[in-house]
Amino acid sequence: MDNRGNFSGRIGFILAAAGSAVGLGNIWRFPYLAGENGGAIFLLVYLCCIFLLCYPVMVGEIAIGRAANRDAFGSYSKLGGKNWGYLGLFGILAGIMILSFYNVVAGWAFGYFLHISFGDLLNHENFGNFFGEYVNDIIDVSSINGLANSNLIFSLVFMALTAIIVSLGIQKGIEASTKIMMPALYLILIGIIIYSLTLPNAIEGVKFYLIPDLGELKIQTVVDGLKQAFFSLSLGMGALITYGSYLSKKENITSSAAVISMADTSVAFFAGLMVFPLVHFLAYKLEINAQEIGTSGPPLIFVVLPQIFHEMGPLLGRFIGGSFFLLVCFAALTSTISLLEVPVAYLVDQKKMNRKYVVWMVALLIFICGLPSMVSMGMIPALNKLTFYRGQDFLTFIADMSDITLTIGGCLMTIFISRRWGIHNMDAELALGNETYMQSGVRRFLHITIRWVAPILLGFLSIVIILEKFFGIANLI
Ligand code: TRP
């Protein structure tokens, strides 16, 4: 397995893996989940999930990938036999499913970036209506200020950008692009936070976000926190097995995983710190109560934020709004490349196919798989209200199914390590690049979490998530 490609070093790997982790999940989903689940309480639950469950799973995945030096399927089958290979395959399919809808949402964000920066999107009166029409009509090529208003094209372009990067390989494609996009993302994020904190009423938003509402802890909060943590850290489907397989034996996995988790968590945290002051600024401007602004749910960044950019005035709004959506595009792109790399690595490693050819073929296929999600926002009524899924749309259905596969995948991975591969083999892998590992507290912590805490809690919570998705949590308790 020579010439599979590799990261040039620690920084390249960390930035690529953090790039995979930081995505729409952090900027689009984390703030509204936090808002719905009581702000600071959610943050606390989320941090516990990261520490107790996600960090060990992340270390485990990277160790498996680096030990086997193969794609997700190849890694499980090499270390555990053909039957375990199916777990890798299950992950690869989950990745395809995630990328199919993820790319649709990324396409919306890309379209918003273009329309705000170069078009007249911010001149609209009613952003709710605009968004409704925008996602509904996927092939409207009538133009707004010369820009075709078609999210079919935007998401096709986004997939093509992803494919170009992945086809360039690990160092020249994935590593080089994340080395530019990740720092840019942090800069834009910090810039917007500083600006938003200077706006009137911003401090109310900070208070809402950071002062815990001491309402009792609900099971929904734990379920939402866990799902979000898994998705946000790109766990449970072999993305980090694949990235780990390109990592040199000289690097320290346990500390890299800690840096990646912190980088991801900090972006999620900062995204909230950017969004809530903005929302409270809007409330002030419109002279209404912040609670009256519907910040819950996906429309947050596509409806509420554009309205805020509109309030900032034409020039500033265009600049801040354009920067914001550029940030979202960077975050999404570093994630889509990691999602595409998983099936690509599988075909290159297992079927010995040519990388460039595989990349374009798989990207096109996944784009096509995404079409049902794209037309499920109203264009095709049957997909907009799935009868077997409590009347929800197909995109939500696919997104929910991926949450389920990730926690199940993570649970099975920990079982794989302790019952099949052997925790001593994981130890041996982690000791490479980390001389003190064998005597460390981290080792003891990983043994307890990977053997007992993670499989039991993840197994239990996966069942709760399945029941919640199909029957609604309110009906369970
Ligand atoms: N973590 C990314 C986000 O938060 C999404 C993502 C990229 C992902 N690669 C993944 C999720 C692999 C699960 C598995 O937006």
Image: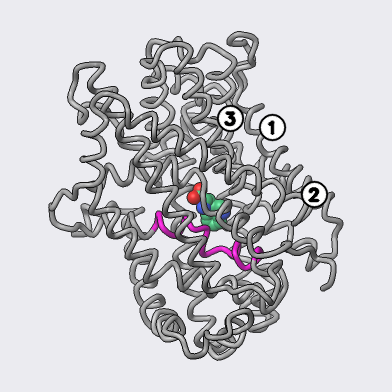
Disc 3 under 8 Å from ligand 1? The reply is: no
Disc 2 target residue: 168
Name the image quarter holding residue 449: bottom left
Quarter occupied by the C terminus: bottom left
Disc 2 is placed on an element classified as: loop
Residue 460, position in %: x, y? 34, 71
Quick check: marks 3 and 1 in contact, CB under 8 Å? yes
Disc 3 is placed on an element classified as: helix
- C-alpha distance separating marks 3 and 1: 9 Å
Disc 1 is placed on an element classified as: helix
Q: Residues within 10 Å of mark 1 (few under 14, many from 20)?
A: some
Majority SS type along the magenta span: helix
The circle on residue 84 is none
Q: Earlier in the sequence, mark 3 or mark 2?
A: 3
Disc 1 target residue: 157
- Magenta span covers which residues? 227-243
Q: Residue at x 50, y 26 (%)?
A: 135
Closer to the eye: label 1 or 2: 2
- Camera-side residue of 155 and 210: 210
Name the image quarter holding residue 282: top left
Which amino acid, mark 3?
Answer: Phe
Quarter occupied by the N terminus: bottom right
Disc 3 target residue: 110
Residue 247, position in %: x, y? 68, 69
Is 396 placed left or right of 280 in the picture? right
